[in-house]
Image: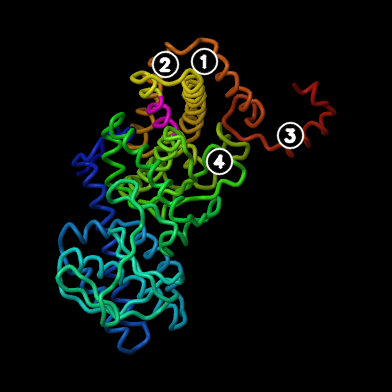
Amino acid sequence: MNTLDERRWIFGGGLSPEWSWVVRRRRELALSELARIETHYLKHAPAGARKRRYAAGLRYFLRTKGPERDRLAVHPCFDYWLDLHARHFGAPVQDSDWHLQFGLFQSFPAALAVARGDRLELDATADPDGRFFLYGTPGFLQAEPTAALRLRAAGGRLEVNGGRAPLQSLAEAVPGIVADDRGWLMTHGVTMHGLVSLDAGERARFASVLGEAFCDLAGRDPGLYAEMRDLLFSLVPLKNPVEHGSVSSSYVNLRGLIALSHAEDRMLQAETLIHEFCHQKMNQLLVVDEILLPGQGGQVFYSPWRPDARRLRGLLLGAHAFLNVARYVATSLAREEFPVEQRIELMVNVALRLNQVEAALKGLTGYGAFTEFGRAFVMGMWRELEVLRHSVLWFPAALLKEQAAAAAAHRKKYALGDTGFYKDASLVDKVRRAAFLTPEEES
């Protein structure tokens, strides 16, 4: 596949051949990196029985073909494990680091052997919190932190240290997508907002509301829902210390994971899932096709969502995510009844997002340099924004005007005039003093 169709990436396009090709490219790159790591491991890892048995897991995973292996190779913990290796194993490390890194990897071949019913014997290591996960399933073992484990898989069952392994289970929001506040490889890379540890009841409720949000998504946007079910594996709960409606994050080295705070509002949770999923989707897409040409990473511009400056890549991801959120909410409003107060809140949400996305697209279009696909993608977002504007003309005119004014007030405060540049308050004060202008005179 030589070219991508920007239309299927702007909104949810379902599990099209193009989607499958992008997933396959990501998987091929991950497995290629694992093969390079295997060579490095055999050359540099400390000698001994565990080296051979860790290598057996690497070899089994790399050489076993099939959908079970392919699915595990795009798991967010596989993503993060590769990232940890890239960051830490280019320089000499202690023997204990080798045992932890490659002992944790054995979760993948162990899960694969159990899924396929293969016979496999492995040495493994519990994570620093004392758990060993069978990724791709809700199951995990409880052990001592970083304990050495001897595993034997046969006939779809797993023995640990010579005995049957009693598996515990994570809660699932929907089959295949777990609520996980306990996996070290899953949560160690989640650095924004703060992790929260839930009790059994809280964990079940967190998963339940998200399951309801997924159910709504399945009915309102089947294409987007299908993509989510294919890409996502894990939902990690976050603290919400200042009682925002929701806090959330996602990570380029944990594709397939969304971290978010709990909320009882299933519409709010659906919006949060869409927002973070769109970042995940773009991070996966950018593996195979860039949108911005190289060399623009250091440039910062006015952000319509925040008081601080953002890079062009941030404007791109924000515009894409909020366009999808606004479309989902607008579609929901058009087809379903909501209580009056909630309906007004949702209209305000859409109206404000439309103006923010427009401001972001102006900054991108005015200052970005794009690949061929990138130009088509950004122009496609402009087109979809205008279609969405047309679809909300039935909103109260006063409400639309009010949100346009709110967006304009934010721009006046943080943008430099009518440009897309960020207004540095300290620099403005220096210019004002140099010109002997008061704030009133400047305005």
Percent x, y of residue 34: 29, 67
Query: Which one is in front in this view, the residue at disc 1 or the one at disc 4?
Result: 1
- Which residue does the numbered mark 4 point to in the structure image? 310
Callout 3 amino acid: Val
Badge 1 crowding class, 10 Å Cα cut-off, few under 14, some 14 to 19, many 20 or more, is many
Q: Residue furthest bottom?
A: 48
Give the label on residue 400, or none.
1
What's the CA distance linking mark 4 and mark 3?
Answer: 18 Å
Q: Nearer the viewer, residue 121 or 165?
A: 165
What's the CA distance linking mark 1 and mark 4?
Answer: 26 Å
Task: Choose the circle earlier in sequence order: 3 or 1.
Answer: 1
- Which residue does the numbered mark 2 point to in the structure image? 392
Callout 1 amino acid: Leu
Residue 102 located within the stretch drawn in magenta: no
Q: Residue furthest right?
A: 436
Query: Which one is in front in this view, the residue at disc 4 or the one at disc 2?
Result: 2
Badge 3 crowding class, 10 Å Cα cut-off, few under 14, some 14 to 19, many 20 or more, is few
- Which residue does the numbered mark 3 point to in the structure image? 428
Please tell me whether residue 437 is drawn above or below residue 297 in the rendered image. above
Secondary structure of residue under mark 4: strand
